[in-house]
Image (cartoon, rainbow, N blue to C red):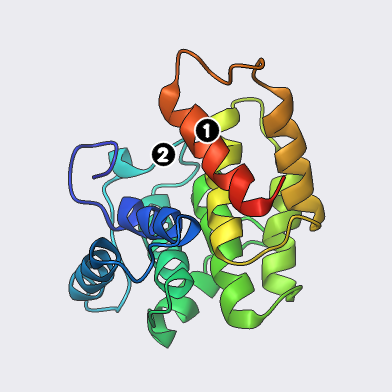
């Protein structure tokens, strides 16, 4: 379910990345989620979300579509499913010259993971997106943004040694006190999950 309370391709793609980190990508829930994503593709062979199903701040009206597609592609690839070449073509068409994709932070986090898996480590597309995330680090970004980015990147196989991953890990570890985020158990658990997977 997305933030809007509806079944969401973007949220489902992100959930597949979590299952990958937990070693459950091939589990029953992982297979069902992957099957559902492939069934709900649009005629253009991509995915759609409503604007209020996108986490964070959207910087363009079309960002919900890009978020849904980027997250679904990254999640499917992470668990060994084929999202189809058409979705990747559409996603590449949303990349700006600065490395960000239409929609801003969350779509770009997911797109970087998708490109790393499809175009190869250190490909131009993935590196531009990762560099944008590393250099942008907007004022409204907090632990949730960094933990979510790291979830996509870890599931995509981007190593801890990559400057963007390393930088986000450092910022994430600097934020809370020794008890994590006592007022936000979800963020504490997500941080433990991704840092454990990365060996940070």
User: Which numbered disc, 1 or 2, marks the residue closer to the eye?
Assistant: 1
Residue drawn at (58%, 64%), measured in percent from left and top? 113
Query: Could you classify mark 2 by the number of other residues whose Cα lies within 10 Å: few (under 14), some (14-19), or many (20 or more)?
Result: many
Separation of marks 1 and 2 at Cα, in angstroms? 10 Å
Question: How far from the left and from the top, in percent, is residue 177?
Answer: 66, 15
Asked which secondary structure carries label 1, the reply is helix
Question: How far from the left and from the top, in percent, is residue 109?
Answer: 57, 53
Closer to us: 73 or 129: 73
Residue drawn at (60%, 58%), measured in percent from left and top? 154
Asked which secondary structure carries label 2, the reply is loop
The vertical placement of 180 against 22, above or below, is above
Residue linked to disc 2: 55
Question: How far from the left and from the top, in percent, is residue 122?
Answer: 76, 73
- In the figure, is residue 3 to the left or right of 59? left
Q: Mark 1 vs mark 2: which is more N-terminal? A: 2
Residue drawn at (46%, 46%), measured in percent from left and top? 60
Query: Could you classify mark 1 by the number of other residues whose Cα lies within 10 Å: few (under 14), some (14-19), or many (20 or more)?
Result: some
Closer to us: 162 or 9: 162
Q: Which of the 4 image quadrants contains residue 127? A: bottom right
The vertical placement of 180 against 126, above or below, is above
| Residue 135 visible here | no
Residue linked to disc 1: 144
Closer to us: 74 or 92: 74
Closer to us: 185 or 8: 185
Image marks 1 and 2: residues in contact by CB distance under 8 Å: yes
User: Number of labelled discs?
Assistant: 2
- Tell me the quadrant of the picture where the C terminus can be found: top right
């Amino acid at each position: 379910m997305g933030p809007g309370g509806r079944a969401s391709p973007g949220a489902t793609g992100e959930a597949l990345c979590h299952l990958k980190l937990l070693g459950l990508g091939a589990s029953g829930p992982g297979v069902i989620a992957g099957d559902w994503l492939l069934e709900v593709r649009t005629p253009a062979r991509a995915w759609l979300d409503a604007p209020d199903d996108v986490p964070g701040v959207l910087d363009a009206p079309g960002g919900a579509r890009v978020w849904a597609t980027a997250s679904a592609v990254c999640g499917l690839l992470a668990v060994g499913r084929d999202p189809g070449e058409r979705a990747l073509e559409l996603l590449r068409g949303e990349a700006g010259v600065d490395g960000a994709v239409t929609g801003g932070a969350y779509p770009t986090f997911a797109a970087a993971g998708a490109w790393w898996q499809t175009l190869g480590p250190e490909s131009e597309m993935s590196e531009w997106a990762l560099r944008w995330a590393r250099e942008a680090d907007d004022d409204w970004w907090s632990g949730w943004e960094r933990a979510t980015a790291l979830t996509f990147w870890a599931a995509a196989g981007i190593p801890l040694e990559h400057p963007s991953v390393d930088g986000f890990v450092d910022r994430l570890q600097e934020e809370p006190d020794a008890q994590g985020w006592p007022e936000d158990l979800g963020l504490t658990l997500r941080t433990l999950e991704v840092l454990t997977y990365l060996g940070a």
